Image (cartoon, rainbow, N blue to C red):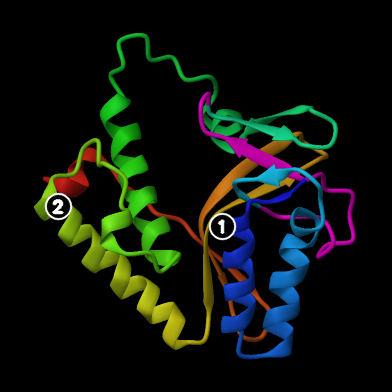
Amino acid sequence: FSLTPEKSKKVAEYMGKATTSVQRDTIEQLFHAATKSNENIASFAVSSKLTNSNTPLVIHIKDPHSYVDIESGEAYESTTKKIKGELNDPNNDFEFNRELGNDFDNIAEVLALNLTDKEFPIMKVLDTEQVKVAVSMITTALDYYRKQGAVIIPQVVVADAASNTAGSIDLLAVHDDGTLQVIDLKTSKNSIK
């Protein structure tokens, strides 16, 4: 398995943006297994090289929302499911909140990848004005971290073999000293009123 050409290019860009060797090494270690495999992976998946553990290489499958170890095929439970339990929403009462969160995730990913606004996917909830406000807010946050020398990587899949759990980090900041910071976006229907 290996990253798709687009994701491989982004990892190379992230390494190029690194301002210190420690930061560059951390980024390389995070994605070592994903860049050295034989089949294409469309998500940023963290390997175990950084922790010297047996953490498997787990990827996110968007539909249906699931995680799988690409080497063994073993399914992993999502952190959300482990914390909140199985989603019981037969009437889709929470679909609006899920779609709103997806809109924000999509905006953050486009901005973190330095893509153009023409590359935004179609929003399910946010209108044009709300997208402009979200872009402004997320850009301000990204600029804050980038001015500190951080490299921002969106939608990074992490997994824990001991608990058979995986999840996606909204934004991962790799600081110039090699430390990592998770940036978690929180949204609700109240945030767009």
State the residue at coordinates (89%, 55%).
Answer: 53
Spatial separation of the CA atoms under disc 1 and disc 2 = 28 Å
Residue 106 is left or right of residue 167, and the answer is left
Residue 10 locus on image (x, y percent): 57, 66
Looking at the image, do the residues carrying marks 1 and 2 touch, with CB atoms under 8 Å apart? no
Residue 188 locus on image (x, y percent): 27, 42
Please tell me which of labels 1 and 2 falls first in the chain: 1
Residue 160 is left or right of residue 114, and the answer is right
Residue 42 is left or right of residue 22, and the answer is left
Residue 48 forms part of the magenta stretch:
yes
The single residue placed furthest to the top in the displayed view is 90
The single residue placed furthest to the bottom in the displayed view is 20
Q: Nearer the viewer, residue 158 or 189?
A: 158
State the residue at coordinates (17%, 61%).
Answer: 133
Q: Main secondary structure of the magenta part?
A: loop
For residue 66, above or below residue 49: above
Residue 14 locus on image (x, y percent): 59, 74
Q: Which mark is residue 130?
A: 2
Residue 151 is left or right of residue 136, and the answer is right
Q: Which mark is residue 6?
A: 1
Q: Amino acid at mark 2?
A: Gln
Residue 69 forms part of the magenta stretch:
no
Q: Amino acid at mark 1?
A: Glu
Q: Nearer the viewer, residue 32 or 78?
A: 32
> Magenta segment range?
45-64
The single residue placed furthest to the front in the displayed view is 5
Question: Where does the C terminus fall, quadrant-wise?
Answer: top left
